[in-house]
Amino acid sequence: MKEILNYKLFEIDGTSLNVFSLLKLFLFVVTILIIIRLIKKVIFRITRIDQSKKYAIFNLLKYFILVLSFVIGLQMLGFNLSILIASSAALLVGVGLGLQNLFSDFVSGIILLIDSSVKVNDIIDVNGLVCQVQEINLRTTTVLTRDDKYIILPNTQLTQNQLINWTHSDITSRFEIKVGVDYSSDVNLVMNILKESVVHQKGVKKEPVPFVRFTDYGDSSLNFEVFFWSDAVFRAENIKSEIRVRIFDEFKKKDVTIPFPQRVVHIEK
């Protein structure tokens, strides 16, 4: 048995790897995986911390443990890390210059996990793309769009670009619908129709109370905006669509006309 455990598999620069070292490394890896799983269970059982912060804390601890375990694993195999780092210093500089963007993504991932400016389940708008954060890793963030497509974004897109976080402090957000009516329309009637159409819509919050603004005299219409609040931020476009249908139906019942631009062309003979 002793001969089997001491059997040399191969040797690199004076450092030999035998069966016992390999077995010891395997047990070490299994132990680390068990520890990570136990840490996850403990963190996610804490009720005083919300789900997104639990996720961030667990990921930071997981990555720290993995990096530390990698270093310890190399030492267990007999590698001299100081010599290894010194001999590969020039190579590391070259690799670092070539992988600047990759390192930027890693740093951005750490920032996202620490400061919680963007959290799992947040609804964000990145360069016009409205999506829900599904997972934040060290290099990339996985998001789900409104048409149910998963997109993997480099973390630098979330830290270096301006973005809107619809649910940063509160999941309830305000939305608006714009509509124009003919100049012959009864302004008070239009405002009542807009407000009633929103108030009775499923998914619209009762508080704060929805309200209507007469915003402008347009070229061919009187312009209004109706404002409402909703918790269904990710699917708000569906709610807005249903409200528009309700408004259109009510306008038809009350003979309120939505004008369209008209142009008069004079032809000289």
Image (cartoon, rainbow, N blue to C red):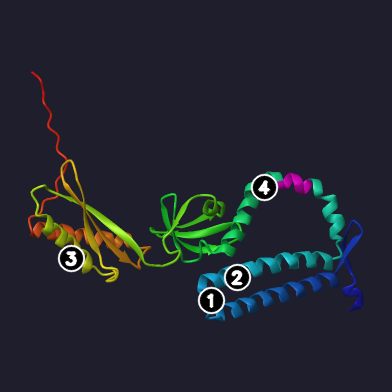
Question: Would you say the residues marked 1 and 2 are in contact, meaning their CB atoms lie under 8 Å apart?
Answer: yes
**Tag 3: residue type?**
Glu
* Residue 158 falls within the magenta-colored stretch: no
Foreground mark, 4 or 2, reads 2
Q: Residue 174: which quarter of the image?
A: bottom left
The residue carrying mark 2 is 57
Between discs 1 and 4, the one toward the N terminus: 1
Q: Secondary structure at mark 2?
A: helix
Question: Would you say the residues marked 1 and 4 are in contact, meaning their CB atoms lie under 8 Å apart?
Answer: no
Residue 65 in the figure: left or right of residue 196: right
> Disc 2 and disc 3: Cα gap in Å?
45 Å
**Tag 1: residue type?**
Ile
Screen quadrant of the N terminus:
bottom right
The residue carrying mark 3 is 196
Q: Secondary structure at mark 4?
A: loop
Q: Magenta region, mostly helix, strand or loop?
A: helix
Residue 139 in the figure: left or right of residue 261: right
Which class describes the residues within 10 Å of circle 2: few (<14), some (14-19), or many (20+)? some
Label disc, if present, on residue 49 of the rendered structure: 1
Question: Would you say the residues marked 2 and 3 are in contact, meaning their CB atoms lie under 8 Å apart?
Answer: no
Q: Residue placed at 56% from the left, 78% from the top?
A: 44
Q: Is residue 42 above or below residue 267?
A: below
Residue 11 in the figure: left or right of residue 182: right
Screen quadrant of the C terminus:
top left
The magenta stretch spans which residues?
91-96
Q: Residue placed at 85% from the left, 52% from the top?
A: 86
**Tag 2: residue type?**
Ile
Which class describes the residues within 10 Å of circle 4: few (<14), some (14-19), or many (20+)? few
Please state the horizontal and vertical placement of residue 21, each as a whole percent of the image.
84, 70
Which class describes the residues within 10 Å of circle 1: few (<14), some (14-19), or many (20+)? few
Q: Residue placed at 56% from the left, 52% from the top?
A: 156
Between discs 1 and 2, the one toward the N terminus: 1
